[in-house]
Image: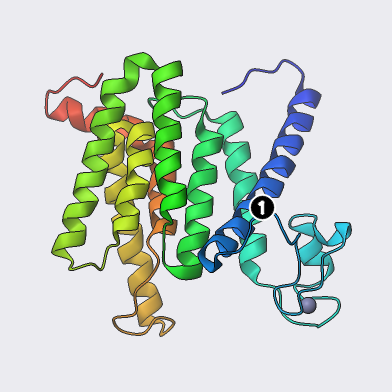
Amino acid sequence: MVFVDSPLFAVFLSIYVFVAGAFFGSFLNVVGMRIPRGESIIFPGSHCDLCKRPLMFYELIPILSYGFLRGTCRTCGGRVSAKHVVFETLAGVLALYTLWHEPTWTLRSEWWLFWGLLLVTSSTDLEAMIVPNVISYPSAALFLLICVVLHPRSISDALLGMAVGFLLITGIHLLSKGKMGLGDAKLYLSIGIVLGPYGTLFSLIAASMLGTLIGYSLRFSGRLKPRQAIPFVPFIAGGVFLTSLVGSPVIDWYLHLLHVSPQ
Ligand SMILES: [Zn+2]
């Protein structure tokens, strides 16, 4: 939670953070589309996926460009994936959410980075059903470093969370005979560090519930074939969001029931 005394400043700050978040989300989505294809994340610059024409500056404004151009390319008339506008909007909303609602977990100020990680891995998972090691290992190292430097008192929680997340998903991976990928387990290294053991468990339960609910709705509506796998990282991201939103009071209440005092 940030404290500002002028309402006007609060409005400007919110707009600024939303726009910055949307630009960041646009970049992360493209990174998530390029890494699985083995393309550079910098060159060539943004271009139409279909005709490869480089985009003009006014076609790079998150959310608005998509609206102006009605989701089509100016040159080839091909449809621009709605995934762009969804990611840009989500990233803006998450940036704004983090500005006004600081989650009270092991790490307090690193949530922008954390949402960035969840967005880029959601993008790679939707694109190619993978969580690339070049993203998951360095992020786990980075979050661990942040924890050691900025929150040394939370290190045991972070390590425990990391172990709980990784081992649980690896267990599910083995039991499900590979339906749940090991990429998800490596992503949970970072999630465990940020959420700690209880938050990690909560997020995993929430993600499974969301996955089951949405998976079955897609299957019943015929948009998903029987046995067709669905990318799980977007549900993990949803589970983490629910954890940041309601996890803390629910976990406290549950631990109180069990007569365990949360730290
Ligand atoms: Zn085009």
Residue 256 in which image quadrant: top left
Query: Is 28 situated left or right of 255 in this image?
Result: right
- Camera-side residue: 36 or 165? 36
Q: Residue at x 85, y 76 (%)?
A: 74
Question: Above or below — where is 213 with respect to 171?
Answer: below
For the image, the number of numbered tags is: 1
Q: Examine the rendering and report whether any part of residue 48 can be seen.
A: yes
On the image, the x and y values in percent for residue 173 come to 21, 60
Quarter in which the C terminus is drawn: top left
Question: Above or below — where is 103 with respect to 134?
Answer: above
Identify the residue under disc 1: 27
Query: Is 119 situated left or right of 16 in this image?
Result: left
On the image, the x and y values in percent for residue 198 come to 25, 34
Callout 1 crowding tier (Cα within 10 Å): few <14, some 14–19, many ≥20: many
On the image, the x and y values in percent for residue 160 come to 23, 31
On the image, the x and y values in percent for residue 190 come to 38, 39
Q: Amino acid at mark 1?
A: Phe
Q: Residue at x 25, y 45 (%)?
A: 166
Residue 201 in which image quadrant: top left
